[in-house]
Image (cartoon, helix red, strand yellow):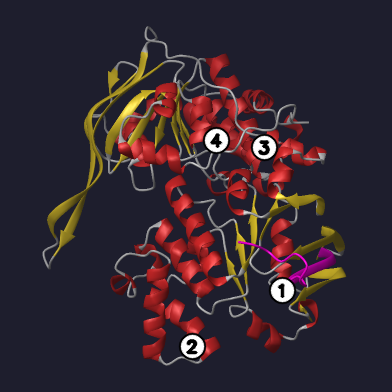
Amino acid sequence: MSIDSESAPLLQIKDLSVAFEQDGHKTLAVDHVSLNLHKGETLAVVGESGSGKSVTALSVVRLLPYPAASHPSGVIDFKGRDMLGLDDRQLQGVRGNEISMIFQEPMTSLNPLHRVEKQVGEILRRHRGLSERAARERTLELLHSVGIGEPEKRLGSYPHQLSGGQRQRVMIAMALANEPDLLIADEPTTALDVTVQAQILALLKEIQTRSGMAMLFITHDLGIVRKIADRVAVMTEGKVVEEGPTESVFTSPQAPYTRHLLAAEPKGSAPPPKPDAPIIVETENLKVWFPVKRGLMRRTVDHIKAVDGIDLTVRRGETLGIVGESGSGKTTLGFAILRLISSSGRIVFMGDAIDTRSWAAMRPLRSKMQIIFQDPFGSLSPRMSVADIIAEGLKIHTQLSAQERDERVIQALVEVGLDPETRMRYPHEFSGGQRQRVAIARALVLEPDFIMLDEPTSALDRSVQAQVVDLLREVQARRDLTFLFISHDLQVVRALANEVIVMRNGKIVERGHTVDIFESPKTDYTKALMAAALYHESAPEGIVAD
């Protein structure tokens, strides 16, 4: 879309500062930031967690936790009005009407107790005064416009009955209901599969072209930025360190931090598979079927075939990558292999058939098979210190003394690159990347042979992802570990996996060496998955991470 840069900006952020006060101490989260955004333009604000990008965006619509948050300086001029000077009634007239917002996680933004029709219709009735019938018609029109199939059937659905992509489309429909002049999108695709991500980005671009709205796009994913943004502002430590046209920033970055971001991607590749290495995990015709029960007598009328006849082999020292969209069965497969859910079919672990073992008989093997989850904050107890979290497995599976356990905790922390002196701190006192290192240390402290990694980097910034990938590769080589790596981030899989399995609807649609899968996919589904992956462009020649 052509942008008239000579006209007055739709949004002008001038010398904005944001401070947060806690226990009498003020912290500056945004430090004298100035940005302009014109009608029909997309401005991407990028940076790592804690850079101030989301705080800047939330300031525009005054959604920060006041009075803990304050603005020591600045003006936010939207269509000639200073947003910081509006009263509550004036703000209500702007929010959801002239300015709308899409958040990262739709499940936390949608009301779980209300159906789709009510949630979209409420915006229309509040701001436009539509009747119930008119609101229903407009809601159907909106759901159809954002690509939700059979919208009539979705009107009565609750958020939990929708897929991740459908929930995000409902959020977009709500945001666009009143045809806003400005759409603020705060990490709207981070939690989505690559195929759904591509669809959502294309949808936003199409709607923008049709309506002429401006878009403020907040993200840490540079691959997305290059696809969608006209201009880019790079933030770190609350300041804008570089701003300019997207292509210019990508091809000729000026700030050292921008060059660091562009270079900070998971790199390298796994060594070739070891055909003579001993087999650690093997499955034959593995199935996980969930019964569908209906009627007064709750009879089983069908099954959801989450995993449907999977054969796989993973050898010592190798990483098997499992990729596929949400609902493909990849995580369920991992849980079945670890015997964390019931399944049928043969499972062999280090030469022993474990599919017939009882839950109690599995306990002696638990120390040899560990798991690292996607969200380190959710998987670490907030009430336990890091030392206690890591030592918990040692208490259960070993007879070590308290001093010996502490020594093992220290060794594990050193191995994952954390200061052992911090082990008495709690998870909330660490960054996301540090928490994931704690989760890795918890798995390693028991000296396992096999680790399942379930989306272990998807919640992390790109530069932190690269660090965690390097750490996992080093630990694997040093300990000759076997990994089952589950992810929808194909770039991370390419950097770690020796072999890849592509899953869809509980079945394997393609398998092979990583290079073959990525460079010569054979099935249409794998080709579509690769095409949808928003690969980051290579950093310009000569750019290296600081």
User: What amino acid does circle 1 point to?
Assistant: Arg
User: What amino acid does circle 2 point to?
Assistant: Arg
Q: Which residue is mark 3?
A: 463
> Does the magenta run of residues contain 178?
no
Name the quadrant containing residue 281. top left
Q: Is residue 202 above or below residue 255?
A: below
Foreground residue, 238 or 250?
Answer: 250
In the picture, the disc for residue 125 is 2
Distance from disc 1 to disc 4, alpha carbons, whole Å, reads 43 Å
Q: Position of residue 218 (x, y in %)?
A: 65, 57
Q: Is residue 354 above or below residue 232?
A: above
Q: Earlier in the sequence, mark 4 or mark 2?
A: 2
Q: Earlier in the sequence, mark 1 or mark 4?
A: 1
Q: Earlier in the sequence, mark 4 or mark 3?
A: 4
Q: Position of residue 490 (x, y in %)?
A: 48, 35
Task: Tell me the element at label 1.
Answer: loop
Q: Position of residue 467 (x, y in %)?
A: 65, 31
- Residues at marks 1 and 3 touching, judged by CB atoms closer than 8 Å: no
Residues shaded magenta: 1-20
Residue depth check, mark 4 versus mark 3: number of the one nearer the observer: 3
Label 3 Cα neighbours within 10 Å, binned few <14 / some 14-19 / many ≥20: some
